[in-house]
Image (spheres, rainbow, N blue to C red):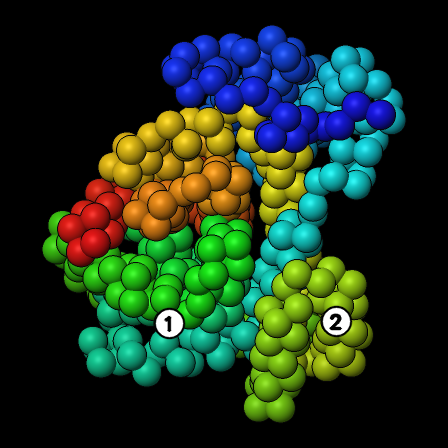
Amino acid sequence: MTEIPRALTSYPSLPNQGLGAELAARIQLEPFNAIATGIFALAILHTFSAGRFTALAHRVQQGHDRKARAQQRGAGPSVVAELLHFLGEVEVVFGLWAVVLFVATTVFMGWEPAKHYINETVDYTEALFVVVIMALASTRPIVGFAEAALRTVARGGGGTPAAWWITILTIGPTLGSFITEPAAMTICALLLSRQFYDLQPSIRLKYATLGLLFVNVSIGGTLTHFAAPPVLMVARPWGWDTPFMLTHFGFRAVIAIVTSTVTYFLLFRRELRAMATLAAVPDIEQPDDEAGDQALLPVPGWVTAIHLGFIAWTVVNAHHRALFVGGFLFFLGFARATAPYQGRIELRTPLLVGFFLAGLVIHGGLQGWWIAPVLGSLSEQNLFLGATVLTAFNDNALITYLATLVPNLSDPLKYAVVEGAVVGGGLTVIANAPNPAGQALLSRFFGGSLSPLGLMCGALLPTVIAALAFRLFA
């Protein structure tokens, strides 16, 4: 049976013929490489065009409604509009193109190789983990616990929206080094939605905040060796532990997070201070769909403690699907038994994010043929810049994983590729695994669809600051 993807060690090394010649030789040896990468490129273009599909869906639905009114009949949803809206959902893009990839793989390589790749080669552990940890982190007891902890800090600044904004964007992202980046992203996004986005800031400040959040979470996971996906990929092969991460990456990340947040605060200080006069945010103790008309009861400490225990179990067993998925099933039973304290358990958004990541790893697993030689051909500074740029179009964990396959990589080059991968993790939705979670939770404040250009512009300044912090303090 043909191996998919082809082992990187099976390609001939052509060190004296240049990168272009090496990539051309790899395509000649395995033509399917070009097909898989072409489909991946189309999927990326689709993510950048998702907003256009959503806007077109609205126009089609409006035209459908006008036609229905003219014919004096009930409007109802337009099938075409619903299909266009589906194509505009960023979370489903890579899954849709994974179907195209699977068909192409079957046609060119055969049914058995295609089935073996999808079912046995691709590792979906990270996607499943994000679903579970995101669902746990978005529960009412956990969000309430995080909000109470951060409120203590925010009160030092008067408890204003600006104080909350600074607190969430500085302390929240560093939680990614302990409870994992997806959990930190979920908590930060939920708190920002309540304490900031609900106050309807300007569109510039919305995108600046989102970009800052994505960048800070991406670099905020580098204080330890076990919580951030791009760090997890290299920690064991390269022998990095938490003291090493803290002294080589962590303190630089903290400098970058504080500097970027203070910089954006100074740029938007007038608007942030003016938000203090706006109406208060609704309290978290509100009934929801499952609670009906009966107000939810205050969350007892023991319920919060058990929730924290489920999160700890999930984090500790992050690499063991049977254990953390089994734990999640027990959690659902516990949540049902303690329903008066829980509210509605949100599963739709975590499942969509997991679907997004599963599609991404299916595509990403076939891109090593060109990413590995590109990384191996760069000098230290160019490797840092290359990893930063490549991360914008590939999950940064894939970039660092492929770096571990490059033989005889020196320590400075190892540092450069990891720094570049985490620094560029906020530029796009697909750059870092937790970003789709933030996008899914906050997109309603952007008309239901994020502008990729708006996000990139919002993340650009924090990315530059992070790059300087990692490179200047090297």
Give the image location of residue 70, x and y in percent: 65, 15
Q: Which residue is at a point 67% across and 65% down the rendered structure image?
A: 345
Front residue of 392/211: it is 392
Give the image location of residue 30, x and y in percent: 65, 15
Residue tagged by mark 1? 243
Which amino acid, mark 2? Gly
Q: Is residue 173 left or right of residue 441?
A: left
Q: How crowded is mark 1: few (under 14 residues within 10 Å), some or many (20 or more)?
A: few
What's the mark number on residue 321?
A: none
Residue 371 seen in render: yes
- Image quadrant holding the C terminus, namely bottom left
Residue tagged by mark 2? 327
Residue that protrudes farthest toward the right in the picture: 112
Q: How crowded is mark 2: few (under 14 residues within 10 Å), some or many (20 or more)?
A: some
- Image quadrant holding the N terminus, namely top right
Which amino acid, mark 1? Pro
Above or below 42: residue 355:
below
Give the image location of residue 130, x and y in percent: 61, 55
Q: Which residue is at a point 80% across and 13% down the rendered structure image?
A: 107
* Labelled pair 2, 1 in contact (Cβ < 8 Å): no
Above or below 94: residue 265:
below
* Label 2 secondary element: helix
Above or below 284: residue 57:
above
Give the quarter of the image for residue 451: top left
Q: Which residue is at a point 61% across and 43% down the rendered structure image?
A: 357
Comes first in the chain, label 2 or label 1: 1
Give the image location of residue 193, x and y in percent: 42, 58
Front residue of 272/32: it is 32
CA gap, disc 2 and disc 1: 30 Å
Give the quarter of the image for residue 328: bottom right
